[in-house]
Amino acid sequence: QKEVEQDPGPLSVPEGAIVSLNCTYSNSAFQYFMWYRQYSRKGPELLMYTYSSGNKEDGRFTAQVDKSSKYISLFIRDSQPSDSATYLCAMSHNNNDMRFGAGTRLTVKP
Amino acid sequence: EPEVTQTPSHQVTQMGQEVILRCVPISNHLYFYWYRQILGQKVEFLVSFYNNEISEKSEIFDDQFSVERPDGSNFTLKIRSTKLEDSAMYFCASSIQGAGNSPLHFGNGTRLTVT
């Protein structure tokens, strides 16, 4: 089983739709969970950062962590064409490295 | 907003040559990282660096790789003898604390092409 699993998509939605992105993981030691957005030929850009289980909301973005199920989600409300990018989940325990999912490519069509 | 900067944006080299990729982390950050992303694949951890020494490295980071912080602002990744399979995007990142305690901020990467 891969340490972090993420459906690579691609995922295509109409403008205004609610987008749901998900990752599962196998390492129960992960405590810190992040979502990054990556545009083509750019570095990952931090979107959301959460510790342990629970929800976190920032504008149109909501991150959820369910440690009991080893499952994290990112929801994007009122999606915009500018949200079209690859979304990467990432997670870490108390060491210094971070493990990334494969990334889900999202296209929001006008 | 402060950012991580990487140079060059694209580096082409011949197999067997040495390359040095350069990064300027965010100025008040203490932890530095290199990641790579082979085209179409996931972002992979290479190495973390703190207090002028490597704190952790992955199995990818073999003897051909080395890192250095030659002065108070730069952080470099050297590949001693490049191989075709080293072709990838190399991302530098920095954080105030370790990855477990604060998020990483990434540069826009250096695209390394080994011919």
Image: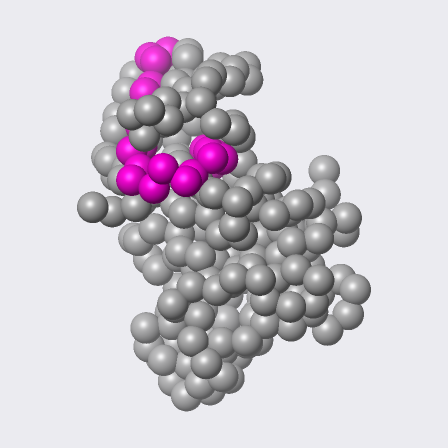
Q: Nearer the viewer, residue A44 or A92?
A: A92
Residue placed furthest toward the bottom = B16
Direction from residue B29 to residue A29 in the image, left or right: left
Quarter in which the C terminus of chain A is drawn: top left
Residue at coordinates 58% horizontally, 52% vertically from top-left?
A: B93
Q: Is residue B10 above or below residue B43?
A: below
Q: Is residue B51 above or below residue B19?
A: above
Model colouring: one colour
Residue at coordinates 34% horizontally, 13% vertically from top-left?
A: A18
Report x, y in % for residue B67.
59, 72
Residue placed furthest toward the left = A1
Report x, y in % for residue A70.
32, 30
Residue at coordinates 69% horizontally, 45% vertically from top-left?
A: B96
Direction from residue B4 to residue B111 in the image, left or right: left
Q: Is residue A31 magenta?
A: yes
Residue at coordinates 30% horizontally, 46% vertically from top-left?
A: A3
Q: Is residue A9 above or below residue B86?
A: above
Q: Is residue A70 above or below residue B111?
A: above
Give the quadrant of residue A12.
top left
Give the quadrant of residue A78.
top left
Direction from residue B83 to residue A56 in the image, left or right: right
The span picked out in magenta is A16-37
Direction from residue A94 to residue A72 in the image, left or right: left
Q: Is residue B52 magenta?
A: no
Q: Is residue B105 visible?
A: yes
